[in-house]
Amino acid sequence: MIRRAIISDEPMVFEMVRKFYNKAFSEFNVEFKEETAHNIGSELIKNHLVFVACDGDKVIGCIGGFITPSQFDAGSNMFQETLWYIDEAYRTSRDSLRLFSAVEDHCKDNGITHIIMASLGNRRDESLARFYDRRGYTHFETTYIKSIGG
């Protein structure tokens, strides 16, 4: 089942955040602080957008991000994805695609004018580029990260 996350999903969404971090960010010296991850996850669920894919009562994946006004037009809201994670055991299922479609439909039905999705610069970039292209997305930015201490 695909649905919008509710606050009682927070512990399971947090586990998705932890897995996403371990898979995507741990190699970049981005520190994982549980309190911060909980606070951001709670903020996304309460005030922005998180959808979950469930197998029974278990959350097996989620897409989450911020809904913000465009920096060029305050009357246009955009969804900026910050998390898209599906448990490895479910990656060959159609849950990831259904989750993605649910977010798109919700955004479209709620006046969000643009969706910005990210790719992490890893071995999946080419397949994600093909996926996004088939869904009508346009590549518009490449992001770089550098640890500078501090």
Image (tube, grey):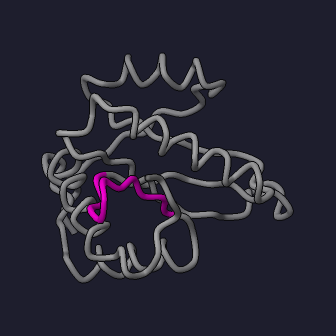
Drawn side of residue 87 relative to residue 67, left or right: left
Which residue sits at x=42%, y=25%? 128
Q: Position of residue 89 (x, y in %)?
A: 17, 39
Q: What secondary structure is the magenta-colored segment mainly?
A: strand
Query: Which stretch is magenta?
Result: 50-60
Residue 8: x and y in percent read: 37, 81
Query: In this rendering, would 4 be left or right of 11?
Result: right
Picture quadrant of residue 11: bottom left
In the rendering, at what x and y percent does residue 129 appear? Answer: 46, 21
Q: Is residue 13 above or below residue 71?
A: below
The residue located at (39%, 32%) in the rendering is: 94
Specify whether 99 is left or right of 103. Answer: left
Identify which residue, 139 or 135, lies in the foreground. 135
Q: Residue 50: give x, y in percent of width and height.
A: 49, 63
Image quadrant occupied by the C terminus = bottom left
Work out which residue is located at the far front of the displayed protein and give it: 56
Residue under the image location 43 percent in, 52 percent down: 1
Q: Nearer the viewer, residue 140 or 35?
A: 35
Q: Is residue 144 magenta?
A: no
Q: Viewed as shown, does residue 49 lie left or right of 96?
A: right
Tally of marks: 0
Q: Residue at x 23, y 57 (%)?
A: 148
User: In the displayed structure, would residue 15 be above or below residue 10?
Assistant: above
